[in-house]
Amino acid sequence: MAPHPLRRQPTPRTTNAAGGNNYGGYQNANTPITAMSYSNNDEQDYSGDDELSGGYAGVYDGSYDDDHNTEDDLNSEALEYYYSGASELVTTVRGDGYGGGGKGYHGGGGAKSRGGYASSLQSHNYEPDESEVWRAYVAQQHFTNRDEYGYYTTDNEQSSAAGGEEKDLNAYFFNFWHSPFLAFLFYQTIFAIIASVFVYIQPVSGGSGIPEIKCFLNGIDLPHILRLKTLVCKVLGLTFSVAAGFPLGMEGPMVHCGSVVAAVISQGNTKLWGNDTSFSQFSDFRNDREKRDFVACGAAAGIASAFAAPIGGVLFSLEEGASYWSTKLTWRAFFCAMVTLGTLFAIRNQDIKFGQANVDKLFALGEFTAIGDGMVNFSVWELSLFILIGCIGGLIGACFNAGSEHLTIWRMKNVNYCKTRRVVEVVVISVLVTTVSFVMPLIWNRCTDLPTDMQGWTNQEKDLVSRLVPFNCIPEKQYNEVASLFLCDADVAIRQLFHFRETGDTDASTFSSAALFLFFVPYITLACLVYGIAVPSGLFVPSLLSGAAFGRLLGHLFHKLDHTSGTFADSGTYALMGAAAVLGGMARMTISLTVILLEATGNMQYVLPLMMTLMSARFVGNVFNEGIYDIHIHLKHIPVLEPEVPTIAERHEIVAGQVMSTEVKCLRPVERVGIVYDLLKNAQHGNFPIVDTASSGTLYGTASRTMLCTLLQRRAFGQPHDVTNGHYNSNNRGNDYAELLGPKRLSPLVQWDTLERVYPRYPTIDDVELRPGDRNCWLDLRPYANTAPYTINETASIQRTYRLFRTLGLRFLCVVNHNNQVVGIITRVDLLPESLSDAIMRGRNAHMVGGGLS
């Protein structure tokens, strides 16, 4: 079959005497990339398809062909139109990965399969398109604001659920056949069902939300996570899930809630009951970069509100949340955390006015005081014991993470695909949690006398004594140790473990070793089961509570070994170290968690012990697996770019030309409307390179999908005679019509603020309707093209490519040769370890094939 007259044939591949330049089996031919040729044909015959192989056409094994060849992208009508010579698709591109066209490596068919959930995600665009209309908008803003001096930048105590201060458990329930257990089970299950209903309505409101926020701040636009509907379902669902008695907390969801609030406020543009509530004052904040920064500040505000730890919140956003940090973001997050704490302070003290302020927190760890005057509560040699506790906590955290990972995999296969099954699972887990919480105190079945001699005790300790639960015991005289841990509020139980005195100089102890063990093992097991079900849930509280029980158990055993000589620190100190160790072993946080615990405890004497405990917990935990948030991110197959270059890239010599996609779809500076429309209709790519055919196909700029759809919807294109002035010129058939126009721009022009006004609800190609005759009109892309796109040379190392892509938060990266001609596109998925491994294997296979043929 004769070749199509408009399709340039592949450039012959030549090698030098030495076999060309090899990069790990990837051979760079001597033949340069030729310019795109356009045959002189009829006026209606547009420029042809040009496969810019970049000299690497013989290396790639066609792994992209199944998903990204032109024939698969176009339907039958478009194919007929395409092969008729009426197409100006210069090359074929796999989209920018998360711009819509790329297929992820984490599909249902295994690590190498493409597609699945990842292919439906979008990447953020943190860098503005430096186009002509953008420059005009910036100049206009400078002119408008030149004379402006100011600017704006882009207690009531809770009673115990098990009986309160004076009442038994039976007094809190209606008569369910005179069975407190049935009443307890009924209310707990009802609350759990209500919590799961909110997740049924908005699935992304389940869980803690921290993994999703981490992904968003890494540059991935997960759908619905920052919607107002998500916030409402998260808050209401969290209220009922905590009331249901699940071993979970609200601190993680508070991070998600704060991020949603920040996103909604920053955009000032929501659709509520069909009404547009836009605020023109926030127009400069309506872009991906500002939204990212506001979400990072919201995450800091969530931690600040939960623990009353503003500095810890800022550091949490830096360490665990944001992938991109700057000085401006630092003071923004600090200011946001300050306002959050000030708001809480004002709400807590609205009745006090100018009197003594109440400093209670949403989640209080209590006040740690020094037992001796001017002395810390531990000896220097005990730092080695704290390191040991950190190591054990890291091991416990690794076991917790491994169990959660296997449970999540099982849920994904058997539960999560059906919303009804998720609700049923919540009911089953609720029944199990309620049964264990009620049965374990019955198994203990031992009553301990309340302390009577409390001279010298602080008001905090006396209040905690009143919170002890008299489960099947004499009220105001006795309490049940296990029930006081299972049936109290989580923050009360943590304060009891932290602050009840047990210095080891007497036999007195509030919680015995057996009671602590009988609580620790079932509780952390239930926490592992609960994390991941269809209710809003956090990990901080169960980690701190189980870790406090573990640490106090160790302190109690140390005192027993010491025969009550008082050699070791008090058990509350060991409880604090145990809480830090278990939470650090699960989440692998160090800096932020140290500051959060210091701000929550209000005692600086624990700085060094906490640092050493958390660091040892992190080291030991990393030996076995990743942190809990990273595990769940990877289980969802979300392509997060880690801070460090993948290990495989460090071990092998890889260049950008090996990992790029060599099939690229391009446009010309002045293009037919019909061609642009067909391209958008049949391809889902997020960005398209614009090549200047008048200068041998060099890169002119890039055009985003959203911009093209907006231009088509607003009919910002000129008539056919606007280009040729109504004269037929046979010398320009199929050539670059930008030369005919010169500096002239086709009208009407759309201003930059008009293009971005609809952010983030840009029109889609389905919203565009072409009238008869529109297909032959011309779309002048020169005023709107990003003429300063980020590029990298094909011979650049993968380490440099990775750092450039991640540091700048790019959506895609154009790969060019030494003549500034586009030879490929690099996207987020191309830089994942699986993609790099595939690139190495392709290079080896090509090297072996080339060697065999030679």
Image (spheres, helix red, strand yellow):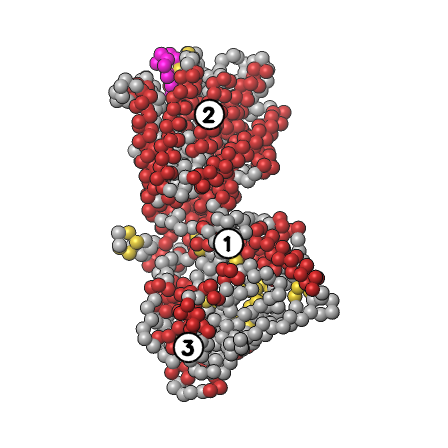
User: Going by the picture, which residue comes out furthest to the front?
Assistant: 1
What are the residue bounds of the magenta stretch? Answer: 467-478
Tell me what residue is drawn at x 31 percent, y 31 percent.
190
Sequence-first disc among 1 and 2: 1
Label of residue 745 in the image: 3
Q: Taken as a whole, is the magenta stretch helix, strand or loop?
A: loop
| Mark 1 or 3, closer to the camera | 1
Q: Which amino acid does label 2 sit on?
A: Pro
Q: Which of 94 and 58 is in front in this view?
A: 58
Residue 92: x percent and y percent? 50, 67
- Position above or below: 264 against 849: above
**Which residue bears the numbered disc 1?**
114
Residue 715: x percent and y percent? 34, 71
Label of residue 516 in the image: none
Residue 491: x percent and y percent? 41, 28
Residue 743 appears in the rendering: no
Sequence-first disc among 1 and 3: 1
- Position above or below: 178 against 237: above
Tell me what residue is drawn at x 47 percent, y 20 percent.
518
- Which secondary structure lies at badge 3? loop
Q: How crowded is mark 3: few (under 14 residues within 10 Å), some or many (20 or more)?
A: some
Q: Which of 305 and 494 is in front in this view?
A: 494
Q: Nearer the viewer, residue 853 or 428?
A: 853
Q: Distance between the residues labelled 3 and 2?
A: 72 Å
Q: Residues within 10 Å of mark 1 (few under 14, many from 20)?
A: many
**Which residue bears the numbered disc 2?**
522
Tell me what residue is drawn at x 60 percent, y 26 percent.
385
Tell me what residue is drawn at x 51 percent, y 41 percent.
631
Q: What residue type is labelled 1?
A: Arg
Q: Which of 407 and 534 is in front in this view?
A: 407
